[in-house]
Amino acid sequence: MYDFYSDTKSIPTKAMLESIISAPLGDEQKGEDPTTAKLEARVAELLGKEAAVFMISGTMCNEIAVKVHCQPGNEIICDETSHLLNYECGSPAALSGVTLRTLNGVNGIFSAEDVKRAVRPHSRYMPVSKMLLVEQTANLGGGAIWPLEEIDNVTEEARKHGLVTHMDGARLLNAVAKTNIEASRYARDFDTVWIDFSKGLGAPCGAVLAGSAEFCHEAWRQKQALGGAMRQSGVLAATCLYALDHHLEQQTIDNNLAASIGERIAKLPKVVKMLPVDTNIIIFDLERDAPTASDIVEKLQKKGILVGAFGERRIRIVTCLNVNAVAGDKLISEISEILNN
Ligand SMILES: Cc1ncc(COP(=O)(O)O)c(C=O)c1O
């Protein structure tokens, strides 16, 4: 199978798994796992923050950030396509008593003016606007990269209104690979930011949430409370350190492969709209008389290719270290056969 469904399906390489064997280990809950501590220090530095906490998943990073930053009755301003809203089981409400105010950005990217309009006036009736969320890159926006200027504009607007700022950086390093802008620069004006290791970086799981030392102290308490504290977590952290040492260039390879696939798909019949392919995600729509997305998914699966249906006639394709140029060529020839018939 050539798996273009998601970069979350990236399989750890043998060398990555071998890195576990020599990793020094200890009890993470006691602060005694040296490999986890090394990973946290490395990510804190990469993101330009004082401290960082290793979490089991990106979802846990988002939810713990919400819990530490917000009180029940608070509201978060975010795009309507955000992972926090769509794929986290309503946890801001369920776990933290927090509601989301959504913006209708362009490919997941909204403006300072949008933020200004969304901030609630002080009122005894209304929720309290508390936090701004930016997703870099914007997954359902087709992996769109937030331009630095927009980031600077929205974080400045947020500060004017006393909002806390949080970046979901699940694929921040794909943006870094494309623009050569440092991760710490993208993260500079955010109170908290995290990166995921289980996507393009190819680790089996794990994400690291960074912020001030005070924030991380509270984040640790929440991680413990939610049962996310581990023991010899260095087994996982070793794979993440391996990814930082060996897989950063992979993000460029993934971005380039996606660009080449996107260019070829855009020229196929019945393809009516493609979101700009900034990084490793390709999202496109088919015209009304084309087969449905689920038909295409099924047909491709029979040919040994996995892609995702993200709407009746919307398809998502994601590149990562599971696939290469040969897989890309096969994907194009099979999709082209389906759409030409
Ligand atoms: C933008 C974004 N944020 C958060 C997550 C959640 O990450 P995890 O699967 O590690 O919980 C994902 C996962 O796909 C994502 O795409």
Image: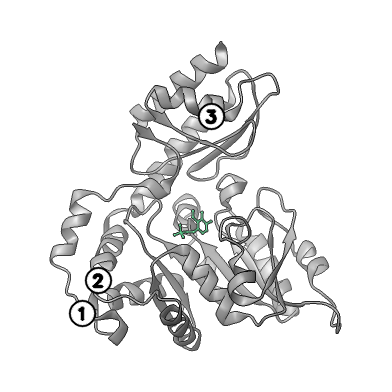
Instruction: Give the crowd class for mark 2: few <14, some 14-19, many >=20 residues within 10 Å.
Output: many
| Outermost residue to the top | 341
In the image, is the residue at mark 2 within 8 Å of ligand 1 by its beta carbon?
no
Label 3 sits on a secondary structure element that is: helix
Q: Is any atom of residue 110 visible in this view?
A: yes
Q: Which residue is mark 1?
A: 26
Q: Which residue is mark 3?
A: 263
Q: Is residue 122 above or below residue 10?
A: below
- Quadrant containing the N terminus is top left
- Give me the C-alpha separation between circle 1 and circle 3: 48 Å
Rendered image quadrant of residue 45: bottom left
- The dot on residue 234 is 2
Is 56 on the left-hand or right-hand side of 297? Answer: left
Whether tag 1 and tag 2 are in contact, CB under 8 A, the answer is yes
> Going 54% across and 71% down the picture, which residue do you hit?
63
Rendered image quadrant of residue 290: top right
Instruction: Give the crowd class for mark 3: few <14, some 14-19, many >=20 residues within 10 Å.
Output: some
> Going 45% across and 19% down the picture, which residue do you hit?
334
Label 1 sits on a secondary structure element that is: loop
- Amino acid type of disc 3? Glu
Is 67 on the left-hand or right-hand side of 254? Answer: right
**Relative image position of residue 292 (x, y in whole percent):** 61, 26
Q: Nearer the viewer, mark 1 or mark 3?
A: 1
